[in-house]
């Protein structure tokens, strides 16, 4: 008879299971299902914090790629939102989707609350304060200051329920991509 092994975390529970990652003995009480086999609580915590850990570099690269895609897509939304409610909402969803894809692609499929908030802000800026629209207003010279342009754009975006709904849908589309 081989010697009985006990769970690393519950020393009174005999077990023949072990963590696929570190090899520690685990029992049905503490094992957590992984992509392949089962992991111990320590390894599960470690891999989870890794995927949720967003470095400053991630924010810069993710922010830049999200803003570039969001600026382009958000400008298309500005142009197309005059063609009706459905088009406006559908394009808004696409903006959020594209921004989240751009961020996700550039930082390597991280998820979690922090990156959700970040993606939501980038999407919001892309629609509410689209850089292309700001630039085009600046070149017309209609508005005497940058601040007035931002104020006018805020008013335009909050001028009707459809635009507000489009903002919400776009942010939701971006945020849902990064949920845990
Ligand atoms: Zn382990
Ligand atoms: Zn255990």
Image (cartoon, grey):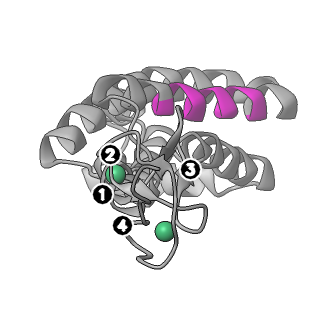
Look at the numbered disc 1 and give the secondary structure of its residue. helix
Viewer-nearest of discs 1 and 4 = 4
State yes or no: Cβ of the residue under disc 3 lies below 8 Å from any atom of ligand 1: no
The yes-or-no answer for disc 2 within 8 Å of ligand 1 is yes
- Taking the image as shown, residue 162 lies to the left or right of residue 68, namely right
The local crowd at label 2, few if under 14, some if 14 to 19, many if 20 or more residues have their Cα within 10 Å, is: few
In the image, which disc is placed on residue 84?
A: none
Q: Which residue is mark 2?
A: 23
Q: Are marks 4 and 3 in contact (CB under 8 Å)?
A: no
Q: Is label 4 in a helix, a strand or a loop?
A: loop
Q: In the structure shown, which secondary structural element does the residue marked by tag 3 occupy?
A: loop
Identify which residue, 138 or 95, lies in the foreground. 95
Of 5 and 125, the residue lying toward us: 5
66 with respect to 17 (left or right): left
Kindly identify which residue carries mark 3.
179
Of labels 2 and 3, earlier in sequence is 2
| Residue shown at 51% from the left, 45% from the top | 38
Height in image: 37 above or below 41?
Answer: above
Q: What percent of the width, then of the height, locates residue 2?
A: 42, 49
Q: Choose the circle earlier in sequence order: 2 or 4.
A: 4
Mark 2 vs mark 1, foreground winner is 2
Instruction: Say whether marks 2 and 1 touch (CB < 8 Å).
Output: no
Extent of the magenta region = 89-100
Confirm whether residue 61 shows in the render: yes
Q: Which mark is residue 8?
A: 4
Q: From the image, state whether disc 4 or disc 3 is nearer to you.
A: 4
- Whether the residue carrying mark 4 lies under 8 Å from ligand 2 is answered with yes
> Mark 1 and mark 3: span between their CA atoms?
34 Å
Q: Is mark 1 within 8 Å of ligand 1?
A: no
Placement of 55 over or under 82, stated as above or below: below
Q: Which residue is mark 1?
A: 147
**CA–CA distance in space, label 2 to label 4:** 10 Å
């Amino acid at each position: 008879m081989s010697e009985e092994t006990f769970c690393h975390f519950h020393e009174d529970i005999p077990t023949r299971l072990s963590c696929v990652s570190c090899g520690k003995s685990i029992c049905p009480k503490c094992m957590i299902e992984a992509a392949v086999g089962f992991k111990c609580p320590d390894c599960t915590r470690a891999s989870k914090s890794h995927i949720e850990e967003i470095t400053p570099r991630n924010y810069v690269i993710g922010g830049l790629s999200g803003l570039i895609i969001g600026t382009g897509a958000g400008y298309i939304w500005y142009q197309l939102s005059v063609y009706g409610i459905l088009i406006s909402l559908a394009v808004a969803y696409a903006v959020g989707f594209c921004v989240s894809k751009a961020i996700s692609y550039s930082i390597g499929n991280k998820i979690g609350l922090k990156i959700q908030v970040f993606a939501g802000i980038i999407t919001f800026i892309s629609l509410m304060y689209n850089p292309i629209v700001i630039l085009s207003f600046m070149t017309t010279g209609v508005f005497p200051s940058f601040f007035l342009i931002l104020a006018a754009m805020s008013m335009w975006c909050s001028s009707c329920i459809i635009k507000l709904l489009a903002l919400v849908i776009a942010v939701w589309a971006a945020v849902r991509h990064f949920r845990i």
